[in-house]
Structures are given as structure tokens and as C-alpha cells.
Image (cartoon, rainbow, N blue to C red):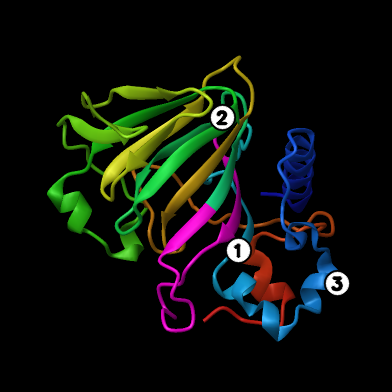
Amino acid sequence: MKRSEINQIIEYTINALRREKFPLPPFAYYGIEEWKNLSDDEAEIVENMLGWDITDFGSGDFRKIGLTIFTFRNGNFHMKEKYPKPYAEKMLYVLDGQVLPFHYHWNKREDIINRGGGKLEIVLHNSTTEDFEDINGMIMHRKGTFAGTPVKVSVDGKTVVVEDGGSVILEPGQSISLSPGQYHQWKGVPGTGDIILFEVSTTNDDTVDNRFYDAGERIPGIEEDVPAQYLIFADYPKFTKIQRR
């Protein structure tokens, strides 16, 4: 992805959230100098991958296949004594008609909440036992497998069984609980508007806990065509003196 595109995406999202009166913490607006001068007492931001996260999943077409994320809080798989939080919270901004490709998580259990805007369609499959147990990070982007069995989820506290490849529509205010090993793809229902989603989950590490069905890279390579106005979490090692362990 180009840095100019990432700058524009974050600026668009900030303005959209302001219009909807969804505030963000101060570090959401940090510029490069503030990141370069980040103090040790803000190490949690870097070490727990808080902040912006933009991806087009290797599609080259963010508007069609992509996601804008802001992580407010998170634990840490690797430093549990320092960061004992067993939970994470994110804002997920979905453009009208935008798709998140099929994937699941080996460890993360998550609730996806439509906080406002358009409708979200989530398509569901179970993974196979072989797929679920295959956790070698080197093959995470090879094509996965669907089990072909009904999928059981919780929608607003109600148990719902969806046929293999079936979908659930989340209206504003509705939520769904997803378990590890459940493939899910979502799409903003075209014509209903952008969506402000929130994710409440167990501790999350997007560098090791995503199993995609057939999508490309989760963390984008960046072409530095213009200076960065904001940073995504993958930028932190380059711009901050605090290094993630």
C-alpha cells in the first residue's frame, strides 16, 4: 500500500468518527515527532500494538477488500506478567460494500458489535480439524478448508445455527460472538452506508493468530511515496525508540 493512501484512509476515518461523535484517545492523532519522542511510560502502546492498523489483505484494492482498525487496549501473548489483561477492544471501520476476507483465529474469541451506520453481512463456515491444527505460521496464507457443517454462533445472546456458507445480518446495535476456528467473511451491505464496528475479544496478536482461507498478506508492505502523517502499528519499530519484544 502507498503511504499516501494510508494517510488518506486514517484522515477519512478520523473525520467520520468525529461526525458521529466517537472520540479517540490522544495517541490516535500523534504525528511523527511525537512517535519519535515517545516516552518509556507509553511503552504499552508499542508493545501491545495499540493504535491504527490499515490493511488491504494484499488485494491492491482497499476500497473493495480491506479494513481500518484502531486498537484501544490489548493484552500480550509474550509478556503476560507485565501485561496481564486477557482482553482486547478495537474499532473496525467498514466502508459501504467493503469486504473482509475469510479467516479465523486459533486463539482469539471475539464479539463483533455493530455500533452504527450500515448493515453488516457475515458469512460463516467451520474449519476442518486438520486445518485448525495446522498452526505453522509459514503456511498461514495457503488455501484453507471448510468443514461443510452447520455453524453455531451467538447473536445478541441467542444461539443461532447457520448452514455451511450461510450468513447473519447485523443491524446497528446487534452483535455476534465468534469462536476460534470459525471462518468468517464480512461485507458492508452495499447502499446501507459505512459501519462503525467494535470488537471485544480475548488478547489479540495479528502477527501470529490469523488463518486466512485464500487472502494475501495481513500486514501491508508500504511504499513511502509521501511522508507519514500517522503511523500504523507495523511502523512502530521504524519510528519509535521502544521496540516490541
Residue mark closest to the camera, 1 vs 2: 1
- The mark total stands at 3
Q: Is residue 106 above or below residue 112?
A: below
Q: Nearer the viewer, residue 97 or 34?
A: 34
Give the residue number, with chain letter if any, for mark 2: 98
Q: Is residue 96 above or below residue 68?
A: above
**In this picture, which residue range is highlighted in magenta?**
64-89
Q: Residue at x 38, y 54 (%)?
A: 210
Position of 210 with respect to 228 (left or right) is left
Q: Main secondary structure of the magenta part?
A: loop
Residue type at mark 1 is Leu
* Res 75 seen here: yes
* Res 206 seen here: no
Q: Secondary structure at mark 2?
A: loop
Position of 100 with respect to 163 (left or right) is right
Q: Residue at x 75, y 82 (%)?
A: 39
Q: Secondary structure at mark 3?
A: helix
Q: Whole-percent x and y of residue 48?
A: 54, 70
Res. 89 mark: none
Q: Is residue 128 above or below residue 158?
A: below
Res. 61 image quadrant: top right
Q: Nearer the viewer, residue 237 or 76?
A: 76
Q: What is the crowding at mark 2: few (fewer than 14 residues within 10 Å), some, or many (at least 20)?
A: many
- The disc, 3 or 1, on the residue closer to the chain's N-terminal end is 3
Residue type at mark 3 is Glu
Q: Whole-percent x and y of residue 165?
A: 27, 26
Give the residue number, with chain letter if any, for mark 3: 33
Position of 244 with respect to 36 (left or right) is left
Q: Whole-percent x and y of residue 149?
A: 14, 31
- Is 228 one of the magenta-colored residues? no
Q: Nearer the viewer, residue 43 or 158?
A: 158
Give the residue number, with chain letter if any, for mark 1: 50
